[in-house]
Amino acid sequence: MQKWGIIYCPNSSHFRPQKRWEKIQTVLNQYHIDYDYVQSESASSVFRLVGMMVENGYRTIIIVGGDSALNDAVNCIMTYPPEKREQVRLGVIPNGKINDFAHFWGMKENDIEQTVRWLKQQRVRKIDLGCIRYTNSMHEKCHRYFLNSLNVGLVASVMNLRRKTRGYLGSTILSFIPSSLMMVFQRLEYKMKIDINDEKIQRKVMTLCIGNAPGYGFTPNAVPYNGWLDVSVVYHPHVTQLIEGFYLLYSGKILNHRDVHPYRTREVVVEKAHKASIGIDGRLMNAPEGPFKVTVEPEVINFLIPQ
């Protein structure tokens, strides 16, 4: 087995991050994994470190981190031509503030041994990525890929709050409840103009979720290997319906809500999203200048999955 390249992204919500790494290291040694590792200095360093490992010939790159770190990793890998990408296998040991993409595959933060056992088996699945193409404030054409989802509007703000409260509460479920309740202090409607499957939506929208995977509960049927994006357009419900929406979200049945309108597509064009926040894999991004397009890139990343 070739030597792995491991990037450890310390999680500030852990009381003793170095102890967490020592526990992971013990399991890696127990399974006789041959590896080199580096620790990311900041959130912005993962992109650079992944590039360094690709250039140095590592075929298996493991991110010990969460959704945001994985997002940086795939965006780095996608800068290489297909023949170079084909040589790289990406895996994750969940360690971030938000680990929803790892959870989709059944990987849990508290079961390091099971995750390492799966990774060692080197079972690869080619997965899709979503991609947003937009113009930035400098009038430059830009794009960014995502594994889980792109959210426009209220949910983007909630996910940002969730990242912050996760650092204090140390629990995904505990952090999601107060961040959702804090929705009452957020702006609840945004004027949007959206094109999906030849249907034009022009009205006030609470949130738009475009999911390559379950999308933090808003695209629960999305999977990152079918070549499609799932889309949920959520209109502003009344207060009683909002309470019902919380229940359906937490129970995985959000698509049953009368104000949630689901679609499946390969392309979404957002012509206008007035003053709406945009989140990509749980992290806020700088709002595009003007319209933007979201598409799916089928089977572009080799991802290590459980048996």
Image (cartoon, helix red, strand yellow):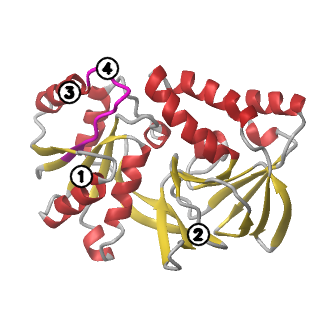
Residue on which disc 1 sits: 61
Percent x, y of residue 20: 25, 25
User: Mark 1 or 4 closer to N-term?
Assistant: 4
Packing grade of label 1 (10 A; few <14, some 14-19, many >=20) is: many
User: Disc 2 or disc 4, which is closer to the eye?
Assistant: 4
Disc 2 marks which amino acid? Thr
Start-end of magenta stretch: 6-16
User: Mark 3 or 1 closer to N-term?
Assistant: 3
Q: CA distance from mark 2 to mark 3?
A: 39 Å
241 drawn magenta:
no
Packing grade of label 4 (10 A; few <14, some 14-19, many >=20) is: few
Residue on which disc 3 sits: 18
Percent x, y of residue 148: 52, 50
Q: Residue lying furthest front in this view?
A: 138
User: Disc 2 or disc 3, which is closer to the eye?
Assistant: 3
Q: CA distance from mark 3 to mark 1?
A: 20 Å
Quarter containing the C terminus: top left
Residue on which disc 4 sits: 15
Q: Would you place residue 276 above or below residue 107 in this image?
A: below
Q: Are marks 2 and 4 in contact (CB under 8 Å)?
A: no
Q: Residue at x 30, y 38 (%)?
A: 118
Q: Residue at x 50, y 76 (%)?
A: 138
Residue on which disc 2 sits: 295
Disc 1 marks which amino acid? Ile
